[in-house]
Amino acid sequence: MSLLPPPDFRLDGKRALVTGAGRGIGAAGAAVFAQAGAAVTLCARTLSEVEANAAELREAGFKADAFALDVLDTVTMQREIAARGPFDILLNNAGANRIRPITDVTEEDYDAVLDLNLRAALFVAQAVAKGLLAAGRPGSIINVSSQMGHIGGPGRSLYSASKFALEGLTKCMAIDLAPHGIRVNTICPTFIETALTRPILDTPGTRERVLSRIQFGRLGQMEELTGPLLLLAADASSLMTGSALMVDGGWTAG
């Protein structure tokens, strides 16, 4: 029997950009990329958070730096990414949510959620892709979506709309960039137990409803996202593009 080589999950020699890297999925992704050998650049609006995360990674012996970036400021964002790139990996993580019944949604709510979750995601990915194209390098763009990009939920009209759109955008980006060796995929988590989700889950009835939909009957843990994130970043997923990687505990299967 001829043995196939094991999959390559190392990121040595690669550079990764992580938006929204101050906490949550962004911070977790930056940490696992760095541990896999990538030189990681963390960015978010709050400089102190990403600087602290980058410092912790450097103290552990990994390569990391940080800078402040408002991804909604398209001109500044494009300039900064062009100056600091090219980046082989993008974790396109910055996002927002406003939970409202459809009858209470305002134009300001719409702009806040769609501008960050869709418009900014598009132009950040575009900026990274342009850097890779100019350098003639392949790469991996990971757009952080959600199970709510595949289903609906109470009060989630804006969030689901933005994530459904991000799924479509990702497929089109994947088609456009595949000839250049640039892969584009989404990761779609369920509810992950963090300080940010706790207030939502503490709303009367919400935790019970959520746990009834997750087939494992429990919330996800942040460390359960790092393996899927590393898969999408690494050459182990070299044939994956335009895909949605569900990490939802079976929510969308039910």
Image (cartoon, helix red, strand yellow):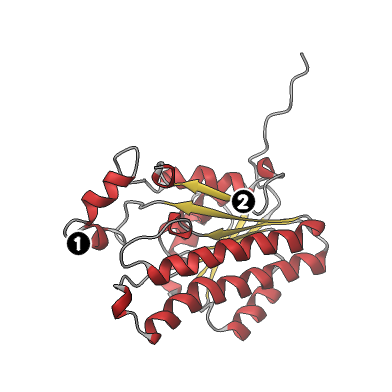
Three-letter amino acid code at the position of disc 1: Thr
Q: Sequence-wise, which precedes: disc 2 or disc 1?
A: 1
Q: Position of residue 204 (x, y in %)?
A: 16, 59
**Residue 42, which numbered label?**
none
- SS type, badge 2: loop
Measure how far apart labels 2 and 1 are at the Cα level.
33 Å
- With respect to residue 74, does 185 lie above or below? above
**Residue 203, which numbered label?**
1
> What quarter of the picture does the C terminus occupy?
top left
**Would you say residue 235 is visible in this rendering?**
yes
Question: Which picture quadrant has residue 64?
Answer: bottom right
- With respect to residue 122, does 136 lie above or below? above
Left or right of 208 on screen, residue 196? right
Left or right of 2 on screen, residue 92? left
248 vs 70, nearest the viewer: 248
Residue depicted at 53% across the width and 72% down the height:
118
Three-letter amino acid code at the position of disc 2: Ser
Q: Position of residue 79 (x, y in %)?
A: 66, 81
**Would you say residue 93 is visible in this rendering?**
no
Residue under numbered circle 2: 243
Left or right of 14 on screen, residue 251? left
Q: Position of residue 198 (x, y in %)?
A: 26, 58
Q: Position of residue 49 (x, y in %)?
A: 41, 68
